[in-house]
Amino acid sequence: MKRINFFMMGIALLFSGALFFSSCSEDPIIPTLNFIAEPVGYEVTITVESTDVSTWTWDYGDGQKSTAPGSHKYTYKQSGEYNITCVATSSDGNFVNKTVKVTIAASVKEMLTGTPTSHPNGKTWVLDPKYNTGKNGAGPLTATLPITQPFPIDNVLDMLKLGGEYDNEYTFKADGSLVINNKNGVSLGSQMYSFVVPPATGPAPGFEGASGLCGITYAPKAGGKFEDKKGDLSLDVVIEDPANLAAGWKVGKLNLTAQVYIAPTDYFAFLDISKTILIKEITPDKMHIIALMHGVVERPDLPSTALHITMVVKK
């Protein structure tokens, strides 16, 4: 009996050893991973190539994580440079990781309002008193919107007895609201507006007839809103006929594709009958805009001049 027991024990040991060596001889499962991240606006498309991945862990570099399985999209809340890191793990616990840097450019709205971190109460803009070469002046309403009458001096509004309007503040907030603070109760605007919209508003001290500009007594509306959009813009305008200057002005079309800023419940920077502002250029600290100014007595309802203005962030 003892001989048989020893024999059976030997067989058992051999069998278990065979299993041990068999399991050790299996190749480990090593995952492979590669991905690219392509931003369009604030949305990033992540395209993945991988093999033998069982679980995924994504870190988007903004404090957010996910376990999205492979290719997917992710939307950031604000601009900046972010490191997207993925850890891909196989079924037996082996893993690989990869990090890709992505740059999210600021939208026009973010540059207007700031971010919750940089400007929690919104971003405030004021008129720039400095002359910006090639940026400030006036010109006709044509497709190129040229500056034919530059303002080649600093503090040009002082010369026009309107220097007090440099203090007016326009605060854009992330919720789409626009708060106007014209500190002396006067807003920079066009003479035509003061003629067409009496007596609620009208010329204020500092009225300057030669420039087409004036100070207008104005109480900003509560609950002002703004929206920004990009697209084709087609407006009826008063234009000068280049083929027949003797004929003077005529009604025409202004067709543009531009970043169009609209303040539908109030105005921005320049008070006039038309409340459309074209944004030529914008950075987080400065923007060059075009205000459509009405100035032809025979057609006060239509804009006739492009007024090129520079705004800066209040320090």
Image (cartoon, grey):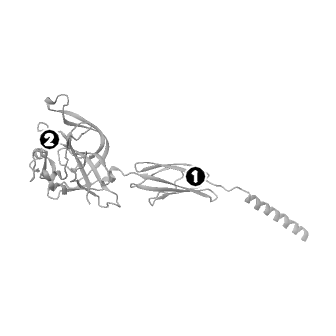
Q: Earlier in the sequence, mark 1 or mark 2?
A: 1
The tag on residue 295 is 2
Q: Residues within 10 Å of mark 2 (few under 14, many from 20)?
A: many
The tag on residue 33 is 1
Q: Is residue 175 visible?
A: no
The tag on residue 84 is none
**Residue 241 horizontal/vertical position (percent):** 19, 31
SS for tag 2? Answer: loop
Separation of residues labelled 1 and 2 (CA atoms): 64 Å
Residue at the far top in the pictured view? 243
Q: Quadrant of the C terminus?
A: bottom left
SS for tag 1? Answer: strand
The residue at the point 77 percent across, 60 percent down is: 21
**Which one is nearer the viewer's eye here, 275 or 223?**
275
Q: Residues within 10 Å of mark 1 (few under 14, many from 20)?
A: some
Q: Is residue 190 left or right of residue 55?
A: left
Q: Is residue 243 left or right of residue 286?
A: left
The residue at the point 14 percent across, 32 percent down is: 248
**Residue 289 horizontal/vertical position (percent):** 25, 47
Instruction: Please give the count of numbered marks on the rendered protein.
Output: 2
Amino acid type at image mark 2: Gly
Q: Quadrant of residue 24?
A: bottom right
The residue at the point 16 percent across, 51 percent down is: 157
Residue at the far bottom in the pictured view? 2
Q: Quadrant of the N terminus?
A: bottom right
**Residue 182 horizontal/vertical position (percent):** 17, 56
Amino acid type at image mark 1: Leu
Q: Is residue 29 left or right of residue 287?
A: right
Q: Quadrant of residue 79?
A: bottom left
**Residue 240 horizontal/vertical position (percent):** 18, 33
Q: Is residue 298 visible?
A: yes
